[in-house]
Image (spheres, helix red, strand yellow):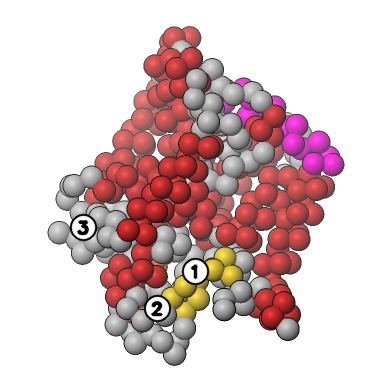
């Protein structure tokens, strides 16, 4: 049995789950869409949401930043994606991967999966190598291939599990769409299935190994306005924080690791209050 | 004094925020918000697995 045992140990974890749930509901507030299968077409869809939330989901009231980015890059006529890149840059500089810990619906889904009692194995040899895969996904499937293949958002088409969930909802609510589904949908179901099953065993496998958005926001963890701070004077190097981290980071050594999703488990576990997440210079 | 410290410790974030805001403004000016809405208000066949 793994040391984390799939539990959100502290009540602060419960607060985070609550915030994630509210964020997910707000981003998917077109509730009637879940019954009619019709997607929302209002003005709020001009704005990209911070996390991974497919715009083809009937509940979505905003645009997915990864889908929007690929749409610009794979357009018949190339247009530099100033607007989408600006949003990603702004959110990254403000929050870094706080988005992953608190705002992303697909992050919430994986947190819930890991709470299900099942065999847990969150640390294994390949883990550290697989982490690089998400940068390849970002570079190849989100940027290079959409630039080379017109009208082909490759990450959305072949991988994105958020899109597959939108597809499953459409499958049950829209008979016309159901009749068109074939091999590609089966492939996407297999990918989603692998992510879901591995999410029962490993904490957030999609975030760790595949998500291009997490990879992008990770670059900002060191500089973001909201980041983690370690008080070297207080830290006794007891490893309580490292043991609490389900992303397998030692925040007493790397408080701003690109892998950190800012869940705050380490902050709550530290017996010396040596860690905090916030804006440097604003503390009392 | 404190404000100074706050800016100094977060200078990279502040510069990136300004750059992000500038890109957003230029994108809106070039009509890219409409392009995002256009894509987001139709079912994306690739996303849902039809292709
Ligand atoms: S890594 Fe991706 S899927 Fe995971 S929480 Fe972050 S944005 Fe969402
Ligand atoms: S739990 Fe606190 S005191 Fe212990 S190693 Fe981590 S930061 Fe240092
Ligand atoms: S280092 Fe702390 S905040 Fe970051 S993922 Fe690990 S436990 Fe969560």
Q: Is residue A139 above or below residue A235?
A: above
- Check the image and name the residue furthest to the front: A284
Does the beta carbon at disc 2 come under 8 Å from ligand 2?
yes
Is residue A46 visible in the rendered image? The answer is yes
> Which residue in the protein does label 2 denote?
A273
- Check the image and name the residue furthest to the right: B29
Q: Which mark is residue A5?
A: 3
Q: Position of residue A216 (x, y in %)?
A: 56, 56
Q: Tell me whether circle 2 and circle 3 mark residues in contact (CB < 8 Å).
A: no
Does the beta carbon at disc 1 come under 8 Å from ligand 3?
yes
> Which residue in the protein does label 1 denote?
A277
The boundaries of the magenta stretch are B28-44
- Label 1 sits on a secondary structure element that is strand
| For residue A230, side relative to residue B35 (left or right) | left
Q: Is residue A140 above or below residue B11?
A: above
Q: How many marks?
A: 3
Q: Earlier in the sequence, mark 2 or mark 3?
A: 3
Name the mark nearer the viewer: 1 or 3.
1
Q: Quadrant of the N terminus of chain A?
A: bottom left
């Amino acid at each position: 049995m793994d040391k984390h045992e799939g539990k959100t140990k502290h009540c602060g974890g419960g607060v985070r789950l609550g915030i994630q749930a509210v964020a997910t509901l707000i981003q998917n507030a077109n509730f009637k869409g879940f019954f009619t299968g019709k997607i929302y077409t209002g003005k709020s869809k001009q704005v990209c949401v911070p996390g991974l939330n497919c715009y083809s989901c009937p509940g979505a009231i905003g645009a997915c930043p990864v889908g929007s980015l690929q749409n610009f890059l794979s357009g018949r006529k190339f247009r530099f994606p100033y607007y989408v890149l600006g949003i990603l840059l702004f959110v990254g500089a403000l929050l870094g991967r706080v988005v992953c810990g608190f705002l992303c619906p697909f992050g919430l889904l994986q947190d819930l999966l890991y709470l299900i009692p099942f065999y847990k194995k969150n640390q294994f040899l390949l883990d550290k190598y697989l982490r690089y895969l998400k940068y390849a996904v970002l570079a190849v499937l989100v940027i290079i291939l959409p630039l080379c293949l017109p009208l082909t958002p490759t990450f959305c088409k072949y991988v994105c599990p958020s899109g597959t969930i939108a597809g499953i909802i459409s499958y049950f609510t829209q008979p016309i769409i159901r009749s068109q589904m074939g091999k590609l949908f089966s492939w996407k179901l297999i990918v989603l299935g692998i992510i879901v099953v591995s999410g029962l065993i490993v904490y957030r496998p999609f975030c760790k190994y595949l998500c291009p958005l997490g990879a992008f926001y990770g670059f900002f963890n060191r500089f973001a306005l909201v980041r983690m701070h370690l008080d070297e004077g207080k830290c006794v190097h007891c490893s309580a924080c490292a043991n609490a981290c389900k992303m397998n980071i030692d925040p007493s050594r790397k408080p701003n690791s690109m892998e950190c999703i800012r869940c705050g488990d380490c902050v709550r576990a530290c017996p010396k209050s040596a860690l905090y997440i916030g804006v440097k210079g604003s503390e009392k | 004094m404190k404000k100074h410290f706050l800016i100094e410790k977060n200078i990279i974030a502040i510069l990136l925020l300004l750059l992000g805001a500038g890109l957003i403004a230029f994108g809106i000016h070039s009509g890219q918000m409409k392009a995002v809405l256009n894509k987001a208000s139709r079912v994306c066949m690739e996303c849902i697995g039809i292709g």
